[in-house]
Each structure stands twice: as structure tokens, then as C-alpha cells.
Image (cartoon, grey):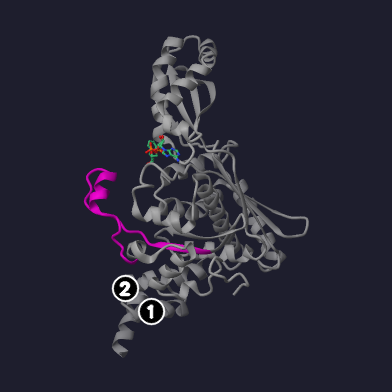
Amino acid sequence: MSSNSSSNSSRISGFHKLGVPERVQRVLDFAGLPAAGLAPLFHGTGHLPVALADQLIENVVGTMNIPLGVATNLLIDGQDYLVPMATEESSVVAAVCNAARQCHDTGGFITSMSATQMIAQVQLVEVPDPANARLAILEHLDEIRDVCNACDPVLVSLGGGFRHLEVRIIDAASGPMVVTHLIVDTRDAMGANAVNSMAEKIAPHIESWTGGRVRLRILSNLADRRLARARCIWHVDAIGGADVRDGIIQAYEFAQMDPYRATTHNKGIMNGVTAVVLATGNDTRAIEAGAHAYAARRGWYSSLTHWEVTRDGHLAGSIEIPMAVGLVGGATRLHPMAGACLKIMRIESAEQLARVIAAVGLAQNFAALKVLATEGVQKGHMSLHSQNIALMAGAQGDEIALVARRLVELGTVRIDVAEQELEALRGGA
Ligand code: NAD
């Protein structure tokens, strides 16, 4: 156990060995939250009332529960975090805890953010003179700013609103298109609805200035003006030596050069990222789409992270990823569990949340590359997976751990073997 084991340290010894109610209590204590009101939310699994679910989407028939775990050991910008993660995949939470433990005592993660700006696109077609039209739109900068800001006085009062204007010409098969980008600071909102309203409002103006016809008016999920960044140095001694470090670098270089590898490399990063995005009620598809498009920004699909050796021989990892998450809008304010997860992390702004998520993505990537470059994934994965297989075979209560352990001992994590072992266990009882 580290020396940082006070109640406000995220290094909680033996957290995984506690029962669920004890874990909930530790998390609430860490966040300084009263158990009353919040604890029942965690103890039950049906925390989304059907009436609320019915308001969030259409044709509701029920809710779908996903396990919510908490990643420990995360030290981000000098502050300890316990990070809730919603995922159905085993090993994901453990991987983050593991990676974060190996850098906690040497400073943890340092993060930053480019801005909280989103882009709305307005597509203008049927323009015979696209270069002329482009300049005509740019000339109306002040008017565009006023129209956009008038759409959302609340956002403007919070320091957000229209920031920049870009106009591009795209040569499409049907003819030139003039594409206007409205760049808007959406502060603590993800901002899709906010910028879509602005794009729709400005469309008739663009038509009148150019004589063209507006078709699409919609946000771009390539949120490259909302980049969350995280970096971290793992000391070479803390990660098992120079050979492990070099294996991680070679694994990264493989992903950098090969899209087949990069896809899985980035999928691992998104295991961490998406789990926090989901836990906070944010739009997972928006983040996934933005991340993968950003990974292909150079013209080929590549790694979202970067790994190198420092002058002292340590391992430096970094990530830069579009992170359009919000604290208002969509399900973020409405879903009771999303609100509780934000409280556990003591999140005060969308920027802070985005930075924490970037750190989680980097931690996840470190854990994956380290295990891949050394023992391989199956050993750790299979011991967790064996529990699912034991459950599938019908094991209950204490039987689950016994059957799972036996499967790992046999080195064969298969449903038929689990059934045989369960039968033998029950027969022998
Ligand atoms: P929203 O419109 O519900 O809320 C945003 C508004 O809240 C702002 O416009 C502002 O007026 C107000 N607000 C109050 N406090 C604020 C604060 N502190 N910071 C900023 N704004 C504040 O939500 P939204 O974020 O515009 O939209 C998000 C939702 O849109 C998500 O559910 C997403 O799934 C959905 N969506 C996504 C896409 C896409 O990704 N392509 C497209 C359409 C809709």
C-alpha cells in the first residue's frame, strides 16, 4: 500500500476485495457525499425509473443495466480521483487501476484542453460561383456572430457563444459545395442542439447572400477544436524494466504504421474512454466517431496515443483526443446515476471531465500495451472471463469462484469444461 492511503487518496488498498456495499461506502466517503439518497442508487440495479426512460427515448419497454465499476489510483493534475466506469467487458476497470497504480507515486497524469468549441456545418449547393460565394459569406462575420449568439442567450451569458467562421469549398461529384463552419464555444454543454439551432437560423441568410441553396445544417462530430490531452511518465523501474518499456514502444510503433493494429489499439483506448462517457450520461457515439476520425486525420488511420523514451530512460505516454462531453443537456442532467458519477469525481466543468477521460484513455492504453508486449492478454483476461463462463454454465454463489479457478488451473476456459467441473463439484458435495 502506498504512503498516500489517506481518505482522500485514490490509492485504496484491497478495494477489489471488498463487497459491493463496502465499496459504495468507501467511494461516498472519498467524495464526501452523504450516504442518504445516493447509496440506494448504487445498491439497486434498476436506478433509472421507467417514466424517465420513457422521456429520454422512444418506444420504451424497459431499461438495460450495465455494470458500473470504479477505477482507483488515478492522480490527475495533482488531484486524486475515483472514476466511475460503465462497461460490460471484464478487465477494463482493472486495467485502468493497474496502469494508474504504476504512475501514482511518481506524479500521475498531467492534462490540458485546447478549448470547448464545437463546429456546425452549413452545406450550400447549386452555387455557380463558389469562390465569390465564399467571400460573400466571410464578409458577414459580424451579422453571423449576432444571429448565432441571439439563438442562445443562456450560453452567451455563461461566457460561450460564437467564436470563429470558416468557409471551405468542396468539389463534389454533383458540383462545388460551399461549406460554412460556425465555431461555437459551448462551455459545459456537449453542444449538438446548441450549434444545430445556430446552423438552421443562419441558413436562409447564407442563401440570400449567395443565391445558392442550403441543404444540411448540422454539427460535426470531428470535434478537433475540443481536444483533451493527457500525458504521463511511467518510471522504467516501476513498469518492470527497459525490456518492458521497449516492448511498449514497439507495440505503439506497430499501431502507428498499421491500421489493422491501430484499430484494436484504439478500441482498447475507447474501452476506458467510452466507459466514463457512458457513466456520465454522455453521447458515446459522438465520442467514438470523433476519436476514430481524428485518428485518421493524417490521411491514414493511426494511433490516438504517442509513446517515447525520456532522456532519463523512462516511458512517456501521451494522448490527444476530441472530447465533446457535457454536464448539461441530453441525459447528463436527467439520469440519476450520471449525476452521482459526476459527484464522485467532484467534476465542476465539462473541461475537467474531458481531461479526466483523456487520462483514463491513456491509462487503458498503457495497460493494454504492457500486457500485450509481455505475457499476452489471455492470462489475465481468462481469469476474469472464466467467471463469466462459470456463470454461463449455471454456477451460483460460491460455485462461481470455484469453477472459475478450476478453469484457469486447467488452462481451458470453455463452457463444456465449466459444465463438467460444475457437475463434479455438485456431485462431490
Ligand atoms: P441541450 O441543448 O439540451 O443543452 C445545452 C443548452 O443548455 C445550451 O445551449 C445552453 O442554453 C444551456 N446551458 C445551461 N447551462 C449551461 C452551461 N453551463 N454550459 C453550456 N450550456 C448551458 O444539449 P446540447 O449539449 O446542445 O446537446 C447534447 C445532446 O444532443 C446529446 O444528448 C446528444 O446525444 C444530442 N445530439 C447529438 C448529435 C450528434 O452528436 N451529431 C446531434 C443531435 C443531437
Instruction: Give the number of marks.
Output: 2
Q: Amino acid at mark 2?
A: Ala
Which label is found at residue 403? 1
Say which label, 2 or 1, has the lower sequence index. 2
Residue 88, horizontal then vertical, whole percent: 39, 60
What residue span does the magenta drawing correspond to? 43-72
Q: Residue furthest bottom?
A: 428
Q: Is residue 135 left or right of residue 36?
A: right
Few, some or many residues within 10 Å of mark 2 (<14, 14–19, 20+): many
Q: Amino acid at mark 1?
A: Val
Q: Quadrant of residue 392?
A: bottom left
User: Can residue 172 be seen in the rendering of this structure?
Assistant: no
Ligand 1 rendered quadrant: top left
- Name the quarter where the N terminus is drawn: bottom right
Residue 63, horizontal then vertical, whole percent: 27, 54
Q: Is residue 193 left or right of residue 234?
A: left
Q: Is label 2 within 8 A of ligand 1 (CB to nearest ligand atom)?
A: no
Residue 320, horizontal then vertical, whole percent: 59, 45
Residue drawn at x 43%, y 9% is 211
Residue drawn at x 59%, y 66% is 101
The verdict on residue 176 being magenta is: no
- Name the quarter where the C terminus is drawn: bottom left
Few, some or many residues within 10 Å of mark 1 (<14, 14–19, 20+): many
Evaluate if marks 2 and 1 touch, with contact meaning CB atoms under 8 Å apart.
yes
Tell which of 393 and 339 is nearer to you. 339
Tell which of 410 and 325 is nearer to you. 325
Q: CA distance from mark 2 to mark 1?
A: 9 Å
Residue drawn at x 30%, y 58% is 47
Tell which of 13 and 360 is nearer to you. 13
> Mark 2 sits on what residue?
393
What element does badge 1 sit on? helix
